[in-house]
Amino acid sequence: MQVPVLVFPQTALRRSLFGMLWPLCQPVRVLEPAGLGGAPTASPLMAAGLVEVLRPPADPTAGQGAQARELDRALRQWEAWAAQHKGSGLAEALKAGLELPSPDRESYRELRQGIKGGQPSAKPLLEAVSGLSGDLFLRLMQLKDQEAAQMEELQARVEQGQDRLAQIIGLEEEDVLPADYEEPFWQKLPPLDYDLAVDRHLARRLGAWADLARRADLAETWLASGDLEAVGWLLATANRRLLPADQAGRSPAGAETMPAWPPQGFEPAADSPLAQEAARLLLPGLGHLTGEELIQLGESLDQDGVLSQMRQGLANLLGRLATEPWSAGLRAELAAPARMLSQSLASHLEALGVAAGPPSRGLSILALPGLKRGQALGLLAGGDDQGLPSLGDWPARWPAGSCPVLAAW
């Protein structure tokens, strides 16, 4: 039994998000923009069929114009240099503003002179994206996503090393209070916060991603995201045509505002057509496990068909949401199966002795009443609400079914 999901708007999968979606969702799919060249880098999760990387056809309008061609050339030059020096620390030193040692200084001189001599670097590119095609813009965002995923992976490995060291020297035993000089972790890692300040580009990124998704084969694939700002944007866009002006995601001056998710102080009525949470799963995160450990866990869960049964339970929830008319009664009926599914996964993990954190994180199943996936992609792409069901038609002439969206938080 498979429950495929497509992550948006990121084009590189983070370990923490995968640990929230899997094992209930498989495969976890990620879109990559055209122009990266070569096949996606293989990984144990991809080889096992847990993760799939999709590369839709290129945008036929991409690369048109002198500015786009020049930016594409500069980006390819940077990508080639970064790939050549991967793992050396030189790219990180460059971003930190450090002077590169010789002979690396000489090998990098041409690229640096090109950037400083008028070729746009990554930061100026983000400042002047009006002339970029969607695919080229997503390639810039791809660099950010890949580095954020790498930073999260490195931090997870450090934390695993700290746990092993604590176990070896006995710090995990009860009533153990080490002296100051015995404390091995006196220098703690800072909280992971590697996101660039690209909030003002969120709408453009969602639009470029939606255009990319429209070129992919997404049959029977559900939308999922760990980007709460992107989720809030989608909900606000879907609700804007159904709310008074003072509640439609705009400030008194008319500027768009970014709603938070989970929402605070705003709870739509369950019998209204507003986009809202239909059900919630409280799940123990598995992001601390390695790819090999996750594969072994999946094999253990699937020995007696347990994994297939749980995925079938999630598929039933999503299927009902996608086909039945939205109502307060449907929302109430989905709550109990979602709660039982959460408890079933937690109990089976405990029985297998899997060290998982407390169920402090959640996976919300959101409902966009009356919309299909294609219409949701249209909203992400920045399209207007022409042709979408209106508030005046609710509920008699409202289409049955809602577009389900999984939001990890």
Image (cartoon, grey):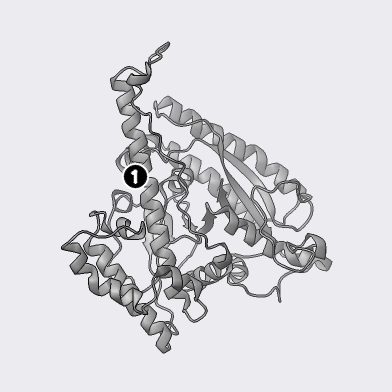
Foreground residue, 48 or 225?
225
The quarter of the picture where the C terminus appears is top right
Q: Amino acid at mark 1?
A: Leu
Q: Position of residue 302 (x, y in %)?
A: 38, 38
Foreground residue, 347 or 227?
227
Regarding mark 1 in the picture, which secondary structure is present there? helix
Relative to 87, 68 lies left or right: right
Q: Residue furthest bottom?
A: 65
Q: Position of residue 268 (x, y in %)?
A: 76, 51
Above or below: residue 19 compared with residue 394: above
Mark 1 Cα shell of 10 Å, populated few (<14), some (14-19), many (≥20): few
**Which residue is found at the position 58% from the left and 59% from the top?**
230
Foreground residue, 113 or 148?
113
Does residue 402 appear in the picture of this structure? Answer: no
Relative to 65, 260 lies left or right: right
Relative to 315, 144 lies left or right: left
Name the residue that disc number 1 marks: 154
Q: Position of residue 319 (x, y in %)?
A: 59, 53
